[in-house]
Image: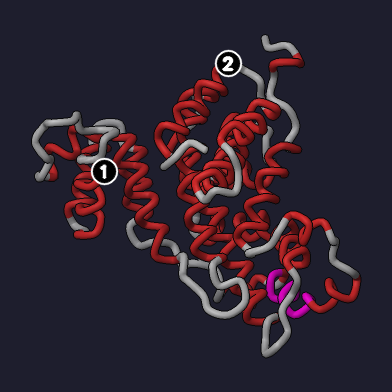
Protein backbone atom coordinates (compact mmCIF):
# COMPACT_ATOMS: atom_id res chain seq x y z
CA UNK A 1 0.00 0.00 0.00
CA UNK A 2 1.36 3.42 -0.95
CA UNK A 3 2.07 5.96 1.75
CA UNK A 4 0.41 9.34 1.67
CA UNK A 5 3.58 10.97 0.36
CA UNK A 6 3.74 8.70 -2.67
CA UNK A 7 0.05 8.25 -3.41
CA UNK A 8 -2.01 10.13 -6.00
CA UNK A 9 -3.15 13.51 -4.75
CA UNK A 10 -6.23 15.60 -5.29
CA UNK A 11 -7.10 17.15 -8.62
CA UNK A 12 -5.49 20.54 -7.88
CA UNK A 13 -2.58 20.02 -10.27
CA UNK A 14 -4.86 18.69 -12.99
CA UNK A 15 -6.92 21.86 -12.55
CA UNK A 16 -3.80 23.99 -12.99
CA UNK A 17 -2.89 22.18 -16.21
CA UNK A 18 -6.41 22.47 -17.61
CA UNK A 19 -6.59 26.15 -16.68
CA UNK A 20 -3.38 26.79 -18.61
CA UNK A 21 -4.79 24.90 -21.59
CA UNK A 22 -8.06 26.83 -21.47
CA UNK A 23 -6.13 30.09 -21.57
CA UNK A 24 -4.21 28.82 -24.61
CA UNK A 25 -7.36 27.65 -26.42
CA UNK A 26 -9.03 31.03 -25.84
CA UNK A 27 -5.94 33.01 -26.93
CA UNK A 28 -5.77 34.43 -23.42
CA UNK A 29 -3.33 34.62 -20.52
CA UNK A 30 -3.65 33.07 -17.08
CA UNK A 31 -4.14 36.59 -15.78
CA UNK A 32 -7.22 36.94 -17.98
CA UNK A 33 -8.74 33.88 -16.32
CA UNK A 34 -7.94 35.04 -12.78
CA UNK A 35 -10.21 38.05 -13.20
CA UNK A 36 -13.40 36.22 -12.24
CA UNK A 37 -16.67 36.68 -14.06
CA UNK A 38 -19.02 39.27 -12.56
CA UNK A 39 -22.69 38.67 -11.80
CA UNK A 40 -23.62 40.85 -14.76
CA UNK A 41 -21.40 38.84 -17.12
CA UNK A 42 -22.80 35.56 -15.85
CA UNK A 43 -26.30 36.88 -16.42
CA UNK A 44 -25.36 37.59 -20.03
CA UNK A 45 -24.67 33.87 -20.43
CA UNK A 46 -28.28 33.07 -19.57
CA UNK A 47 -29.33 32.40 -23.19
CA UNK A 48 -26.58 29.76 -23.44
CA UNK A 49 -27.19 28.23 -20.01
CA UNK A 50 -30.90 27.97 -20.78
CA UNK A 51 -30.08 25.86 -23.82
CA UNK A 52 -27.53 23.80 -21.89
CA UNK A 53 -30.05 23.08 -19.15
CA UNK A 54 -32.83 22.03 -21.53
CA UNK A 55 -32.42 18.53 -22.95
CA UNK A 56 -34.57 19.24 -26.00
CA UNK A 57 -32.89 22.55 -26.85
CA UNK A 58 -29.41 21.15 -26.27
CA UNK A 59 -29.98 18.03 -28.38
CA UNK A 60 -29.39 19.70 -31.74
CA UNK A 61 -25.90 20.80 -30.67
CA UNK A 62 -24.75 17.40 -29.46
CA UNK A 63 -22.75 15.28 -31.91
CA UNK A 64 -24.56 12.31 -33.35
CA UNK A 65 -23.26 8.90 -32.51
CA UNK A 66 -20.80 7.78 -35.23
CA UNK A 67 -22.56 5.09 -37.28
CA UNK A 68 -19.69 2.64 -36.85
CA UNK A 69 -19.42 3.04 -33.07
CA UNK A 70 -21.87 0.24 -32.12
CA UNK A 71 -20.04 -2.12 -34.47
CA UNK A 72 -16.73 -1.14 -32.89
CA UNK A 73 -18.05 -1.62 -29.35
CA UNK A 74 -19.36 -5.04 -30.35
CA UNK A 75 -16.01 -6.01 -31.85
CA UNK A 76 -14.17 -4.95 -28.71
CA UNK A 77 -16.43 -7.06 -26.50
CA UNK A 78 -15.88 -10.13 -28.66
CA UNK A 79 -13.27 -12.47 -27.20
CA UNK A 80 -12.66 -14.50 -30.34
CA UNK A 81 -13.20 -12.24 -33.35
CA UNK A 82 -12.20 -8.79 -32.05
CA UNK A 83 -9.21 -8.19 -34.34
CA UNK A 84 -10.91 -9.73 -37.37
CA UNK A 85 -14.01 -7.57 -36.94
CA UNK A 86 -11.98 -4.38 -36.39
CA UNK A 87 -9.93 -5.16 -39.49
CA UNK A 88 -13.20 -5.50 -41.39
CA UNK A 89 -14.37 -2.10 -40.11
CA UNK A 90 -11.13 -0.50 -41.29
CA UNK A 91 -11.21 -2.27 -44.64
CA UNK A 92 -14.66 -0.79 -45.31
CA UNK A 93 -13.46 2.79 -44.79
CA UNK A 94 -10.77 4.36 -46.96
CA UNK A 95 -9.88 7.04 -44.43
CA UNK A 96 -9.46 4.46 -41.67
CA UNK A 97 -7.32 2.28 -43.90
CA UNK A 98 -5.07 5.22 -44.74
CA UNK A 99 -4.77 6.05 -41.05
CA UNK A 100 -3.87 2.46 -40.22
CA UNK A 101 -1.12 2.29 -42.83
CA UNK A 102 0.28 5.62 -41.60
CA UNK A 103 0.27 4.31 -38.03
CA UNK A 104 1.87 1.00 -38.99
CA UNK A 105 4.66 2.83 -40.83
CA UNK A 106 5.37 5.21 -37.96
CA UNK A 107 8.59 4.96 -35.98
CA UNK A 108 6.64 3.53 -33.05
CA UNK A 109 5.80 0.33 -34.96
CA UNK A 110 8.17 -0.05 -37.91
CA UNK A 111 11.88 -0.55 -37.41
CA UNK A 112 14.23 1.78 -39.27
CA UNK A 113 15.29 0.33 -42.61
CA UNK A 114 12.49 -2.22 -42.88
CA UNK A 115 10.15 -2.32 -45.87
CA UNK A 116 7.07 -0.09 -45.76
CA UNK A 117 3.82 -1.74 -44.67
CA UNK A 118 1.38 -1.56 -47.58
CA UNK A 119 -1.31 -4.17 -46.88
CA UNK A 120 -4.22 -4.25 -44.44
CA UNK A 121 -3.28 -7.71 -43.17
CA UNK A 122 0.32 -6.80 -42.32
CA UNK A 123 -0.71 -3.51 -40.73
CA UNK A 124 -3.33 -5.20 -38.56
CA UNK A 125 -0.84 -7.81 -37.38
CA UNK A 126 1.78 -5.20 -36.58
CA UNK A 127 -0.46 -2.71 -34.78
CA UNK A 128 -2.45 -5.29 -32.81
CA UNK A 129 -5.83 -5.07 -31.14
CA UNK A 130 -5.05 -2.11 -28.87
CA UNK A 131 -3.63 -0.08 -31.74
CA UNK A 132 -6.71 -0.77 -33.85
CA UNK A 133 -9.03 0.27 -31.04
CA UNK A 134 -7.20 3.56 -30.59
CA UNK A 135 -7.09 4.31 -34.29
CA UNK A 136 -10.77 3.64 -34.92
CA UNK A 137 -12.04 5.48 -31.84
CA UNK A 138 -10.08 8.62 -32.66
CA UNK A 139 -11.02 8.54 -36.34
CA UNK A 140 -14.72 8.06 -35.62
CA UNK A 141 -14.92 11.05 -33.31
CA UNK A 142 -12.78 13.42 -35.39
CA UNK A 143 -15.40 14.51 -37.97
CA UNK A 144 -17.66 16.09 -35.34
CA UNK A 145 -14.99 18.56 -34.19
CA UNK A 146 -15.54 21.50 -36.51
CA UNK A 147 -13.62 24.73 -36.93
CA UNK A 148 -15.08 28.18 -36.30
CA UNK A 149 -14.78 31.77 -37.36
CA UNK A 150 -15.07 34.88 -35.26
CA UNK A 151 -14.15 35.18 -31.56
CA UNK A 152 -11.99 32.37 -30.24
CA UNK A 153 -11.67 30.95 -33.74
CA UNK A 154 -8.87 28.55 -32.78
CA UNK A 155 -10.79 26.96 -29.91
CA UNK A 156 -12.14 23.93 -31.79
CA UNK A 157 -8.76 23.08 -33.31
CA UNK A 158 -6.99 23.43 -29.96
CA UNK A 159 -9.64 21.33 -28.25
CA UNK A 160 -9.30 18.53 -30.79
CA UNK A 161 -5.51 18.58 -30.47
CA UNK A 162 -5.79 18.37 -26.69
CA UNK A 163 -8.35 15.58 -26.99
CA UNK A 164 -5.93 13.47 -29.01
CA UNK A 165 -3.11 14.00 -26.52
CA UNK A 166 -5.45 13.36 -23.59
CA UNK A 167 -6.78 10.17 -25.15
CA UNK A 168 -3.29 8.76 -25.67
CA UNK A 169 -2.19 9.70 -22.15
CA UNK A 170 -5.32 8.29 -20.52
CA UNK A 171 -4.94 5.09 -22.51
CA UNK A 172 -1.33 4.56 -21.45
CA UNK A 173 -2.11 5.41 -17.81
CA UNK A 174 -4.98 2.91 -17.83
CA UNK A 175 -2.69 0.20 -19.20
CA UNK A 176 0.40 0.81 -17.06
CA UNK A 177 -0.86 2.33 -13.81
CA UNK A 178 -4.49 1.40 -13.20
CA UNK A 179 -4.99 -1.82 -15.15
CA UNK A 180 -8.21 -0.29 -16.51
CA UNK A 181 -9.83 -0.66 -19.93
CA UNK A 182 -7.66 1.26 -22.38
CA UNK A 183 -10.33 1.74 -25.03
CA UNK A 184 -12.78 3.24 -22.55
CA UNK A 185 -10.07 5.59 -21.26
CA UNK A 186 -9.47 6.84 -24.80
CA UNK A 187 -13.16 7.09 -25.62
CA UNK A 188 -14.02 9.13 -22.52
CA UNK A 189 -11.12 11.54 -23.09
CA UNK A 190 -12.33 12.15 -26.63
CA UNK A 191 -15.91 12.48 -25.40
CA UNK A 192 -14.97 15.30 -23.01
CA UNK A 193 -13.39 17.11 -25.93
CA UNK A 194 -16.62 16.78 -27.89
CA UNK A 195 -18.53 18.15 -24.91
CA UNK A 196 -16.21 21.17 -24.71
CA UNK A 197 -16.81 21.87 -28.36
CA UNK A 198 -20.59 21.53 -27.96
CA UNK A 199 -20.65 23.98 -25.05
CA UNK A 200 -18.53 26.40 -27.07
CA UNK A 201 -20.86 26.18 -30.08
CA UNK A 202 -23.88 26.95 -27.91
CA UNK A 203 -22.13 29.93 -26.31
CA UNK A 204 -20.96 31.24 -29.67
CA UNK A 205 -24.43 31.07 -31.18
CA UNK A 206 -26.35 32.52 -28.24
CA UNK A 207 -23.90 34.88 -26.52
CA UNK A 208 -21.48 36.13 -29.18
CA UNK A 209 -23.63 38.02 -31.63
CA UNK A 210 -22.47 41.23 -33.25
CA UNK A 211 -19.91 43.04 -31.11
CA UNK A 212 -20.83 41.08 -27.99
CA UNK A 213 -18.14 38.63 -26.86
CA UNK A 214 -17.79 37.03 -23.45
CA UNK A 215 -14.40 37.48 -21.77
CA UNK A 216 -12.11 34.43 -21.45
CA UNK A 217 -12.81 34.19 -17.69
CA UNK A 218 -16.54 34.05 -18.40
CA UNK A 219 -16.05 31.33 -21.01
CA UNK A 220 -13.86 29.36 -18.60
CA UNK A 221 -16.62 29.49 -15.97
CA UNK A 222 -19.11 28.21 -18.53
CA UNK A 223 -16.82 25.29 -19.42
CA UNK A 224 -16.26 24.42 -15.75
CA UNK A 225 -19.99 24.30 -15.09
CA UNK A 226 -21.27 22.65 -18.24
CA UNK A 227 -18.68 20.41 -19.91
CA UNK A 228 -19.05 17.47 -17.45
CA UNK A 229 -22.88 17.27 -17.63
CA UNK A 230 -22.77 17.76 -21.40
CA UNK A 231 -20.33 14.86 -21.72
CA UNK A 232 -22.76 12.72 -19.74
CA UNK A 233 -25.61 13.67 -22.04
CA UNK A 234 -23.57 12.76 -25.10
CA UNK A 235 -22.70 9.41 -23.54
CA UNK A 236 -26.37 8.80 -22.74
CA UNK A 237 -27.52 9.73 -26.24
CA UNK A 238 -24.91 7.37 -27.68
CA UNK A 239 -26.17 4.63 -25.36
CA UNK A 240 -22.75 3.98 -23.88
CA UNK A 241 -22.51 1.45 -21.02
CA UNK A 242 -23.69 2.54 -17.58
CA UNK A 243 -20.25 2.11 -16.03
CA UNK A 244 -18.84 4.74 -18.40
CA UNK A 245 -21.60 7.14 -17.41
CA UNK A 246 -20.60 6.51 -13.82
CA UNK A 247 -17.01 7.52 -14.53
CA UNK A 248 -18.16 10.86 -15.91
CA UNK A 249 -20.48 11.37 -12.94
CA UNK A 250 -17.98 10.49 -10.20
CA UNK A 251 -14.49 11.65 -11.25
CA UNK A 252 -11.41 10.07 -9.62
CA UNK A 253 -13.34 7.37 -7.73
CA UNK A 254 -12.28 4.50 -9.99
CA UNK A 255 -9.12 3.51 -11.81
CA UNK A 256 -10.65 4.51 -15.14
CA UNK A 257 -11.65 7.91 -13.74
CA UNK A 258 -8.12 8.47 -12.45
CA UNK A 259 -6.71 7.59 -15.87
CA UNK A 260 -9.13 10.01 -17.48
CA UNK A 261 -8.09 12.82 -15.12
CA UNK A 262 -4.41 12.07 -15.68
CA UNK A 263 -4.94 11.96 -19.44
CA UNK A 264 -6.51 15.40 -19.55
CA UNK A 265 -3.80 16.86 -17.32
CA UNK A 266 -0.89 15.26 -19.18
CA UNK A 267 -2.48 16.02 -22.56
CA UNK A 268 -2.75 19.70 -21.67
CA UNK A 269 0.89 19.81 -20.57
CA UNK A 270 2.16 18.03 -23.70
CA UNK A 271 0.27 20.47 -25.90
CA UNK A 272 1.63 23.48 -24.03
CA UNK A 273 5.21 22.20 -24.26
CA UNK A 274 4.86 21.43 -27.96
CA UNK A 275 3.60 24.95 -28.63
CA UNK A 276 6.35 26.61 -26.63
CA UNK A 277 4.18 27.76 -23.73
CA UNK A 278 5.93 25.62 -21.12
CA UNK A 279 9.21 23.81 -20.56
CA UNK A 280 9.18 20.03 -20.34
CA UNK A 281 10.81 20.16 -16.91
CA UNK A 282 8.00 22.40 -15.64
CA UNK A 283 5.40 20.03 -17.06
CA UNK A 284 7.11 17.07 -15.40
CA UNK A 285 7.12 18.93 -12.10
CA UNK A 286 3.34 19.35 -12.29
CA UNK A 287 2.90 15.65 -13.11
CA UNK A 288 5.04 14.57 -10.15
CA UNK A 289 3.46 17.08 -7.78
CA UNK A 290 0.16 15.39 -8.59
CA UNK A 291 1.48 11.82 -8.18
CA UNK A 292 5.05 11.15 -7.04
CA UNK A 293 5.12 7.43 -7.80
CA UNK A 294 8.11 6.22 -9.81
CA UNK A 295 5.74 4.50 -12.24
CA UNK A 296 4.17 7.84 -13.10
CA UNK A 297 7.59 9.44 -13.67
CA UNK A 298 8.43 6.60 -16.07
CA UNK A 299 5.06 6.98 -17.75
CA UNK A 300 5.64 10.69 -18.33
CA UNK A 301 9.07 9.94 -19.81
CA UNK A 302 7.38 7.54 -22.23
CA UNK A 303 4.80 10.14 -23.18
CA UNK A 304 7.56 12.67 -23.83
CA UNK A 305 9.20 10.25 -26.26
CA UNK A 306 5.91 9.50 -28.00
CA UNK A 307 4.39 12.95 -28.26
CA UNK A 308 6.86 15.81 -27.89
CA UNK A 309 8.24 17.19 -31.13
CA UNK A 310 10.96 18.95 -29.17
CA UNK A 311 12.12 19.00 -25.57
CA UNK A 312 12.23 22.56 -24.29
Question: Where on the picture, by quarter, is residue 65?
Answer: bottom left
Q: Is residue 56 magenta?
A: no
| Residue on which disc 2 sits | 294
Is 47 colored magenta in this rendering? yes
Of residue 20 and residue 227, the one placed in the foreground of this image is 20
Q: Residues within 10 Å of mark 2 (few under 14, many from 20)?
A: few
x 59%, y 73%: residue? 201
Q: How many marks?
A: 2
**Relative vertical location of residue 242 with respect to residue 28 in this rendering, above or below:** above
Dot placed on the residue nearer the N-terminal end, 2 or 1: 1
Left or right of residue 37, residue 71 in this image: left
Quadrant containing the N terminus in the rendered view: top right
Q: Position of residue 121 (x, y in %)?
A: 12, 40
How far apart marks 2 and 1 lie (CA) works out to 29 Å
Residue at horizontal 68%, vertical 81%? 208
Is residue 268 shown to the viewer in this render? yes
Element at label 2: helix
For the view shown, which residue lies furthest in the front direction? Answer: 312
Question: Which residue is the extreme one toward the bottom?
Answer: 210
Q: Main secondary structure of the magenta part?
A: helix
Q: Could you tell me residue 217's position as x and y percent?
A: 77, 63
| Residue extent of the magenta highlight | 45-52
Name the secondary structure under disc 1: helix
Q: What residue sits right under mark 1 in the picture?
A: 103
**Left or right of 208: which side holds 110?**
left
Whether residue 128 is visible here, answered yes or no, is: no
Circle 1: is it few (<14), some (14-19), or many (20+) Cα within 10 Å? many
- Observer-nearest of 162 and 91: 162
The residue at 85%/76% (across/down) is 43
Amino acid sequence: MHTFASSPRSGAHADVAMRRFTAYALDASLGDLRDEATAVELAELEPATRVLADLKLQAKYLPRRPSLLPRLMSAISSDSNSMREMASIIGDDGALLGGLLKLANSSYYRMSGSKPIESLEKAVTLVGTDGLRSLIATALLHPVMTGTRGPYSSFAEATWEHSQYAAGCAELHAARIEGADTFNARLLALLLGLASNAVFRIAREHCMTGSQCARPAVMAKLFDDWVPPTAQRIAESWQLPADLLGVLAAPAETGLARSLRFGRMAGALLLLVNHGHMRELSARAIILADDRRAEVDKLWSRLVILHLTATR
